[in-house]
Image: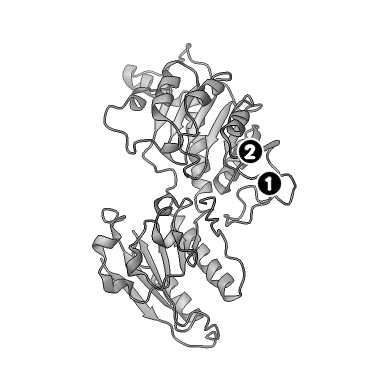
Amino acid sequence: MGSTETTAATNGEGNFDAFKNDILMLHVPLPPDQAWIDKLQTKYPGFKVRWVHRSWQDYGRDDETTAPEEYEGVTMLCSYYPHKAELLPKLKWVQLTSAGADPWLDHPLYLNKDVVFCTANGCHPPQIAEWVIGTYLMLSHHFLSYHDAAVKDGTSQVLRHLTTVDSPGMRMGILGYGAIGRQVARVASALGMEIYAYTRRPKPTPESRKDDSYHVPGTGDPDGTIPTKWFSGSSREDIDHFLSQDLDILVVSLPLTSSTKHIIGPAQFDILARKRTFLSNIARGQHVDTDALVAALKADKIRGAALDVTDPEPLPQGHELLKMPGKCFVTPHVSWQTPYYFERVKAIIEENLERQRKGGRMVNLMDRESGY
């Protein structure tokens, strides 16, 4: 474990001196990409990239496992977890490796308005959309039930007590129509589903519905044309109105803030019970009241649930949500995984360096008041 640091050389392209006094530190559980480091340092003479490789076991304990001198002179940071503010007195930009910033919201560096924060919004949508649709189809087509029956009996037979319903005509509500929600909508609409979108701020015009965040080419809904209807608001009444739209499937893809914690609780499950809505949560476990979810599943108020995030996380051994085959499917916060993830983060870093050099607005710039 250690860091890789190289100083840029000057060549025919060495006319970009915007970052000659800057050091970008990357704290990631991946070995250094020396070719990428060399590319940036050649493009921007004097610019330094300090790549600190952390194992998955040490990830999140950066302050404990990194020597203080590693932080010297750092002006830019790429990381998921917060670092001690006193180690980074010159910091001016944080490029998160996550779409959400919830670990940072009370941190002194986040509260310092002179430090710019950008998210990794757009790195997650392809793989998470596949998780949402894959788990929904797996449960609605009873793949696990057929598999378990075949393993138990050694034969393949029709399970007459199970009913499968296909997707055309289904109505999906996406609570949080950001980059992830837009790719979920793209895939779901290809299956014939109708999409209802919910955003905190109103999106009354075609221009306001466009998305200027990073996205993998050919994915998402950058123009915001897929949803049949748009809903908005920040109150519980606004949320409840959206949930009452006879949704067959509800996808929770919100950032976690103080106002969105337990946004789905007993009252909301009572609303969803009218259509026995299927719940898919790929955002944060605390968006959903776990006790209320267990009660709703037991009372058959909802058709089922697919959870990549839980509260608590991970669930303790033997938890009730882990003992509901055919009704609830749980994975340990892995829907974001893909071998292409950090390639996309690096693309955002490159884009934001260029935008800074040209004096433009950075991509995925965070709104401090909203928390995303």
Look at the numbered disc 1 and give the secondary structure of its residue: loop
Q: What's the mark number on residue 274?
A: none
Closest to the observer, 192 or 306: 306
Q: Which amino acid, mark 1?
A: Gly
Q: Are marks 1 and 2 in contact (CB under 8 Å)?
A: yes
Q: Which residue is rendered at x = 65% and y = 32% of the image? A: 192
Disc 1: which residue: 224
Asked if 64 appears above or below 153 in the picture, the reply is below
Q: What's the mark number on residue 197?
A: 2
Q: Which residue is rendered at x = 65% and y = 51% of the image? A: 222
Q: Which colouring convention does the figure follow?
A: one colour
Q: Quadrant of the N terminus?
A: bottom left
Q: Mark 2 or mark 1, which is nearer the start of the sequence?
A: 2
Mark 1 and mark 2: Cα distance apart in space: 10 Å
Image x and y of residue 288, in percent: 45, 33
Look at the numbered disc 2 and give the secondary structure of its residue: strand
Closest to the observer, 163 or 48: 48
Q: Which residue is rendered at x = 68% and y = 41% of the image? A: 226
